[in-house]
Amino acid sequence: MTLRACSIALLAVLVAAGPALAPAPVVAQGKDVFIPLLVYRTGPFAPSGIPIANGFVDYFTLLNERDGGVNGVKITWEECETQYDTKQGVECYERLKGRGAALVNPYSTGITYQLIPKAPVDKVPVFSMGYGMSASSDGRWFPWVFNFPTNYWSQASAVIRYIGTQEGGLEKLKGKKIVHVFHNSPYGKEANPTLEELSRKYQFELTLLPVDTPGQEQKSTWLQVRKLNPDWIFMSGWGVMNQVAVKEAAAIGFKMDHFIGNWWSSSDADVVPAGDGAKGYKGATFHAPGTNFKVHSEIVKHVYDKGKGAGKKEEMGSPLYNRGVVNAMFSAEAIRTAMKGAKGQAPTPEQMRWGFENLNLTEKRLEEIGMKGFTHPIKVTCEDHEGSGPVLIEQWDGKKWNIVSDWIQPMKDVVRPKIETAAVDEAKKLGYSQRDCGKEK
Amino acid sequence: MTEILYGVFVGPFRDMAGSPAFLVEVLLGGVATGLMYSLVALGFVLIFKASGVFNFAQGVMVLFAALTLVGLMERGVPVAVALVMTMAVMVGLAFLIERVVLRPLVNQEAIILFMATIGLNFFLEGFGEMVWGANVKKLDVGIPDRSFIVAGVQINQLEMSAAATAAVLVAILAVFFQRTRIGRALRAVADDHEAALSIGIPLKTIWLIVWSVAGLVAIVAGIMWGAKSGVQFSLSLVALKALPVLILGGFTSVPGAIVGGLIVGVGEKLGEVYWGPLVGGAIENWFAYVIALVFLLFRPQGLFGERIIERV
């Protein structure tokens, strides 16, 4: 046999034996609960994706290190890089779902829309925390999809309530000019119908200004803002669009404390490039920023001090890191709830779905897990997968985010009927039928 | 129907006439943005002009240059020193590209060289992320970014600085190409590699020079765009905005990159502000390509590009 033939034979053997020689992946081992983590640690959206992924991993590591998992059942996970790309995200899901995925956090509205039809077929609950399809909040039509603690429509209504408070009452909104600068994508457009309805109800002048992705260049948008001279700006942006928008607003001298980003437009990365110009910029959120909570000291003690942290200790506490922690906590508490019928075993898919649907995170429970004041109690029901959770407003002071409002209730009287109507429309497209929650209680 | 015709052919012009100060502001915004596009387009032109290679990695070179500069500044290196060090890095990069990528591919088809730059693009992106991290970084080299009002028109200091920088850069490059021996050699190589070699023009040196100059132009573009949006990986996407500029101005013309940039910048701003609302807005990205395509129909070589006639 020639040297060339030997080389080819060796290569063939290595290729054939590849899977066996590869390092063993983290696999659900019977009693373990396996969670696929769809992350984007690389690419243009990595500045947002990295802190979220680190928050997730640190909280799951905390549970495993401190408590031996959830009720003694270890949590295992595998990260799959999506680069925030829908196609890659779906590929990740398809690759990992067969490993006994207990749930999936898509971390992209585009990926969420693709996974919603798959959820009842694969029996993997989709948990799109505060993003995705707002219509899926109606659990009667979407039993396998959860988007608590609140959705884009509730957020928009809470922001308008906040603006009303700042103006001296909702009735004072009459004649005010409010601009919605939004990412020209299904995600960015989500809040528009709610804002339009509220503008009719409270008679404020609403202008919708889309920004095409990626949003590196927004001069036209901000020329129009300057011409309109609005009283308030609300923004649903993402990635570089946020940083450029904050800089442009500062450059035209817009009052930054009248500029409010949604919860994907108010992270550290969004304000850093504008420097002092970003001071006063506000953002919506459903959890606190910072590290002044017991859960953070627990993460330091059980994770970082043991050298098992996913990122740098000093980067803990940013809004998106904390979002990852909250998301992981909700997931873990749903698993815990699901285990009530699972007797210390990893829950079955049906039990997992039940766990999400019967999650009742009380003030007492939040205190037990070191998150009192960090986020709001939430109760999920068969009808309401959103939980209609309240919203906070945070403000950038040039160095850090500070909470500057009380919990603001969304306008459920406006939002819920819209959700129910939209749920029927969306469910019809998918051929779903409505279930009777009364019979399931 | 009448409403649509009015919206397209009358309404926008009435708006322009009704608020001339705002129209001036839109035009100025377009000029400034167009020059920013030109800064990126110049890098493409330089390399294409001298080597016939469409450098897919030009956007990432802008990013890499800005990342290197801001990365050094974050480590406490003074701005001026960081700038010199970044220039050295970009020249070093040009040396490596010539040695590792281009030299083995001399006289290969243009498509092969193009594919090589695609590989270079992904390598630089990954390498940059590995060395400098993925966080958004603030780039502050002392360029003011506030606006002031002159006769009711708002003018942004950063945009004016970018415009001045682009003008100076073009003047330098024009002199370099037209008046220097190296410039003439660059043009000879662009016309025919083998013929240039046969009369003793050192191809390797020329490629090294042109990639170095493109790297230095990338630093300038990186500083301007980085100051505008922060230094982050999306910066490489500005290359997409340079493509309609190249289609318009031609791939081989330095003044074409500037004029093309101005037409695209002004055209997309006018389109977005006055005609965009008719279709719900957000048209400027594709509107720039529409402008470029219309030009392409009449002048396939671009406004200033060289007409290539191949006889069989």
Image: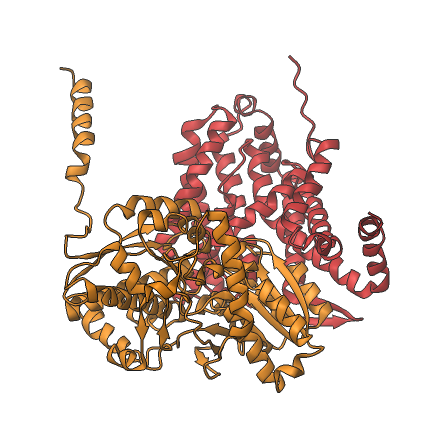
Chain colours: A orange, B red
Of residues B202 and A324, which is closer to you in this image? A324
Left or right? Give the position of B138 relative to B152: left
Where is residue A418? Give x, y as percent.
55, 64
Task: Kindly identify the residue that appears in the image at 20 percent across and 22 percent down.
Answer: A8
**Quadrant including the C terminus of chain B:** top right
Left or right? Give the position of B123 relative to A170: left
Of residues A348 and A177, which is closer to you in this image? A348
- Residue that extends furthest to the top in the rendered view of this protein: B312
Task: Kindly identify the residue that appears in the image at 83 percent across and 56 percent down.
Answer: B11
- Looking at the image, can residue B39 be seen? yes
Where is residue B301? Give x, y as percent.
68, 31
Tally of numbered tags: 0
Left or right? Give the position of B12 relative to A209: right
- Looking at the image, can residue B143 be seen? no
Task: Kindly identify the residue that appears in the image at 66 percent across and 52 percent down.
Answer: B35
Task: Kindly identify the residue that appears in the image at 61 percent across and 66 percent down.
Answer: A180
Left or right? Give the position of B19 relative to A10: right
- Residue that extends furthest to the bottom in the rendered view of this protein: A168
Of residues B49 and A66, which is closer to you in this image? A66
Q: Find residue A250 and report its image quarter.
A: bottom right
Of residues A278 and A52, which is closer to you in this image? A52
Where is residue A189? Give x, y as percent.
57, 59
**Above or below — where is A318 with respect to B131?**
below
Where is residue B210? Give x, y as percent.
53, 39
- Residue that extends furthest to the front in the rendered view of this protein: A439
**Above or below — where is A265 with respect to A85?**
below
